[in-house]
């Protein structure tokens, strides 16, 4: 890594934290999220061309998010030790036996007493056995991205940078449509007159553009 690349990485670690925080609580340890994000940052630093009129943060965010999302697509990097996996199996059997006998789910304390282990070990094994949450869900037949609500300014910045980067890849006419419709508050009829299109053409094109942007942001 060159001196300049090292500087870019060092000065932009905050972006990695901001990106990693978006996916906290989804089944993968924060350290793993951060590590993957750092890999994306290093790749961005290596591929960044300072002669282009694109800020490094704008260039880096999609690379950072891409590495973090790859972590989820690959099933995460969590390695659950064998003892925890074995304890998890015992817990599931004990839960089934207890529920059959008592008609309710056991508490952590009851499981600990039944299996002869500390409650903390029971809680750790249960947490380790939880499945990784999917980044996407389905509503009314359409796929959308799940997210954790947050008022963090850094997350808003990350979203804005990622969106701006995606929009910058659109053709000139498509960029104008999105700019006028969603940043200028113009009607489809106004956009159609301005660009020499019909309202129907603008409507169809806008729908296609939005679908394309959504796919790029969640892929």
Image (cartoon, rainbow, N blue to C red):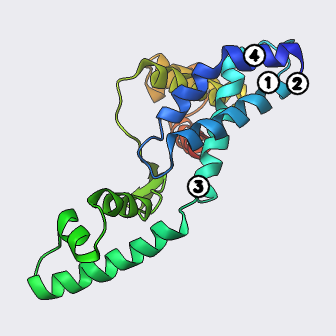
| Disc on res. 76 | 3
Q: Earlier in the sequence, mark 1 or mark 3?
A: 1
Please give the count of numbered marks on the rendered protein: 4
In the displayed image of the protein, which residue is found farthest to the front?
116
The answer to which of 200 and 213 lies nearer the viewer is: 213
Residue at image position (45%, 20%) is: 186
Label 4 environment density (alpha carbons within 10 Å; few <14, some 14–19, many ≥20): many
Q: Are marks 1 and 4 in contact (CB under 8 Å)?
A: yes
Residue at image position (70%, 17%) is: 10
Report the quarter where the N terminus lies. Answer: top right
Counting from the top left corner in percent of width and height, residue 63 is at 70, 34
Real-space Cα separation, disc 1 to disc 4, in angstroms: 6 Å
Q: Earlier in the sequence, mark 1 or mark 4?
A: 4
The answer to which of 127 and 139 lies nearer the viewer is: 127
The answer to which of 81 and 52 lies nearer the viewer is: 81
Q: Is residue 123 above or below residue 154?
A: below
Residue at image position (18%, 82%) is: 98
Q: Earlier in the sequence, mark 2 or mark 3?
A: 2
Residue 190 seen in this snapshot: no
The answer to which of 30 and 19 lies nearer the viewer is: 30
Q: Earlier in the sequence, mark 2 or mark 1?
A: 2
Counting from the top left corner in percent of width and height, residue 34 is at 59, 35
**Which residue position holds label 2?**
1
| Disc on res. 8 | 4
Q: Earlier in the sequence, mark 4 or mark 3?
A: 4
């Amino acid at each position: 890594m060159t001196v300049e690349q090292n500087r870019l990485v060092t000065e932009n670690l905050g972006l990695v934290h901001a990106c990693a925080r978006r996916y906290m609580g989804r089944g993968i340890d924060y350290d793993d999220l951060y590590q993957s994000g750092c890999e994306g940052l290093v790749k961005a630093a290596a591929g960044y061309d300072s002669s282009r009129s694109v800020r490094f943060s704008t260039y880096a965010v999609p690379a950072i998010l891409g590495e973090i999302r790859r972590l989820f697509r690959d099933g995460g990097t969590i390695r659950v030790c064998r003892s925890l996996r074995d304890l998890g199996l015992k817990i599931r059997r004990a839960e089934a036996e207890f529920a059959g006998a008592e008609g309710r789910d056991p508490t952590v304390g009851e499981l600990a007493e039944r299996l002869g282990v500390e409650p903390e070990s029971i809680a750790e094994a249960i947490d380790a056995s939880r499945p990784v949450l999917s980044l996407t869900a389905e509503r009314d037949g359409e796929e959308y991205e799940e997210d954790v609500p947050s008022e963090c300014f850094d997350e808003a910045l990350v979203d804005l940078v990622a969106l701006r980067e995606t929009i910058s890849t659109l053709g000139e006419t498509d960029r104008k449509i999105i700019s006028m419709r969603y940043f200028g508050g113009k009607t489809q009829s106004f956009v159609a007159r301005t660009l020499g299109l019909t309202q129907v053409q603008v409507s169809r094109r806008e729908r296609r553009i939005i679908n394309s942007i959504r796919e790029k942001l969640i892929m």
